[in-house]
């Protein structure tokens, strides 16, 4: 893995503003950005690890933990909120046995993310699993939808 990361670092050697593209490519290689990778990038580039960590935590596109095979996005927009999105999100957490402080299931099957808006207000409440949108959801429909993903 470090050889792949070193190749990425060499690709951007001497370029100003290379931290973001390096982190993007490392995440593509590893699936997320580990603390070990941050330290290694810092050692090899001279970019302070605190700066790399700051970038990785500031931008929502970066992940510091492994993601599940499937990503569930729950909409928290106004239309979804007033249509019961919080209740659905809680039901998803319960169904997946996700503790409050975790967003990826123990078996690595799902990662649950809350998003500001999925752009499907007329279908509220809405979730998206990978690239498929499910609208006008009820708690009763959730089990079948989640069980259809292996």
Image (cartoon, rainbow, N blue to C red):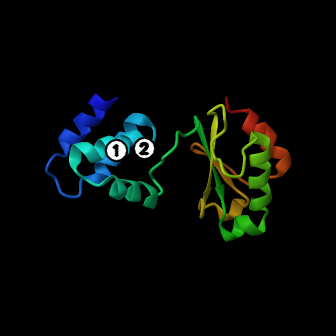
In-front residue for pair 122/51: 51
Question: What residue is drawn where x is 73% and y is 38%?
Answer: 146
Q: Position of residue 139 (x, y in %)?
A: 83, 50
x and y percent of residue 51 in the render? 34, 58
* Residue 63 makes an appearance in the image: yes
Q: Where is residue 84 drawn, in percent x and y?
A: 79, 62
In this rendering, would 19 be left or right of 109? Answer: left
Give the image quarter of residue 35: top left
Label 1 sits on residue: 39
Q: Give the left or right position of residue 31, taking residue 12 as reference.
A: right
111 versus 124 height, above or below: above
Indicate the quadrant containing the N terminus: top left, top right, bottom left or bottom right: top left
Q: Quadrant of residue 9?
A: top left
Left or right relative to 12: residue 129: right
Q: Secondary structure at mark 1?
A: helix
The residue at which mark 2 appears reads as 35
Which residue is more in the foreground, 127 or 54?
54
């Amino acid at each position: 893995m470090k050889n792949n990361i070193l190749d990425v670092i060499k690709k951007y050697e001497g370029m100003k503003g290379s931290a973001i593209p390096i982190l993007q490519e490392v995440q593509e290689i590893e699936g997320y950005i580990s603390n070990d990778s941050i330290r290694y990038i810092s050692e090899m580039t001279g970019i302070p690890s605190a700066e790399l960590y700051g970038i990785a935590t500031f931008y929502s596109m970066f992940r510091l933990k492994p993601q599940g095979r499937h990503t569930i996005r729950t909409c928290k927009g106004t239309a979804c909120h007033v249509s019961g999105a919080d209740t659905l999100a809680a039901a998803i957490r319960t169904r997946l046995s996700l503790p409050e402080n975790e967003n990826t299931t123990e078996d690595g099957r799902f990662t649950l993310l809350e998003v500001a808006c999925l752009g499907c207000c007329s279908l509220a409440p809405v979730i998206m699993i990978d690239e498929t949108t499910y609208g006008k959801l009820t708690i009763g429909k959730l089990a079948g939808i989640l069980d259809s993903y292996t």
